[in-house]
Amino acid sequence: MTRKTVFLLLAMMLSGCTPYVSPPRDTWRTYLRGASMSDMTDGARVAKRPVYMGAGGRLMGDVVNVAPGAEYGDKVANDNMYAVAYMADLEYELYDALRKPGISVQRAGTDVVVILVRDAIMEMDVAEISDTGADTLQTISKILNKYDATFIEIAGYTDAMRDTAAATALSGDMAMRTGVFMARHRVNPVRMFIVGRGAARPIAAQDDIGRLTNRRIEMRIAPAR
């Protein structure tokens, strides 16, 4: 074994042990170029579609094998049928891969929602993605790259805070930090809608345990069509 080969092997081993560190904040917009900093409404998706398609995005019809004769009948009903099947496959893969504390995968109509409690993906005492969180987000990114005919809303939430502006800023930081990680793992940022919602929409009581649950990232994944 040559000295060069030994060096390369050592470098690979060390890189695998290096904790993930978010890039400098002033570079985040570069990583997220094309992402929408807003809610993923139906209107927002329609408006984003030309940009999405121009960036190489694929629609549901581009990836689903449509059965012969499916063009007949009610087009909306047929589209919904294929979208449901595609999203069900996505849901099952996410569910099987993310059986970890603090993480849940849910269905909401044709959409799939992944809830990530903050402490499951970020360090306890600093605003940074943890080693466990990096592994989780890398798994999610890999699956979303497979099911790429989708839009992704990444929404950050906090627990109840007196300073609503600080809550919005903190939740936005969580969402953007997550989006940057995924963009660095080849998830096209044009698919993303990123928003910080502060203490809005709590999913648990505002007691000591509930606060930990309310601090979270929610990813809502919707079919692109």
Image: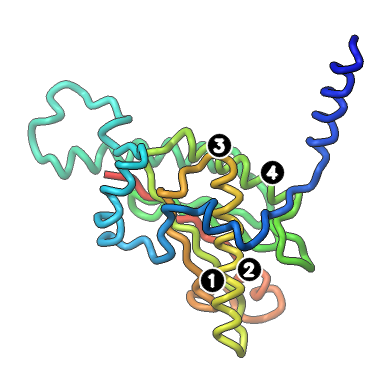
Nearer mark to the viewer, of 1 and 4: 4
* Distance from the alpha carbon under mark 3 to that under mark 1: 28 Å
Neighbor class of circle 2 (other Cα within 10 Å; few <14, some 14-19, many 20+) is many
Q: Distance between the residues labelled 4 and 3?
A: 11 Å
Instruction: Read off the residue under disc 2.
Output: 213
**CA separation in Å, label 4 and label 2:** 20 Å
State the residue position of label 4: 135
- In the picture of the structure, the residue carrying the numbered disc 1 is 203
Residue 170 percent across, percent down from the top left: 61, 73
Q: In which quarter of the image is the C terminus?
A: top left
Q: Which mark is first along the chain, 1 or 2? A: 1
Q: What residue type is labelled 4?
A: Asp
Categorize mark 4 by other alpha carbons within 10 Å: few (<14), some (14-19), many (20+).
some
Q: Residue at x 61, y 40 (%)?
A: 139
Q: Sequence-wise, which precedes: disc 3 or disc 1? A: 3
Q: Mark 3 points at which residue?
A: 142
Q: Which of marks 4 and 2 is in front?
A: 4
Q: Residue at x 67, y 81 (%)?
A: 207
Q: CA gap, disc 2 to disc 1? A: 7 Å
On the picture, is 124 further left or further right than 80?
right
Labels 4 and 3: the sequence-earlier one:
4
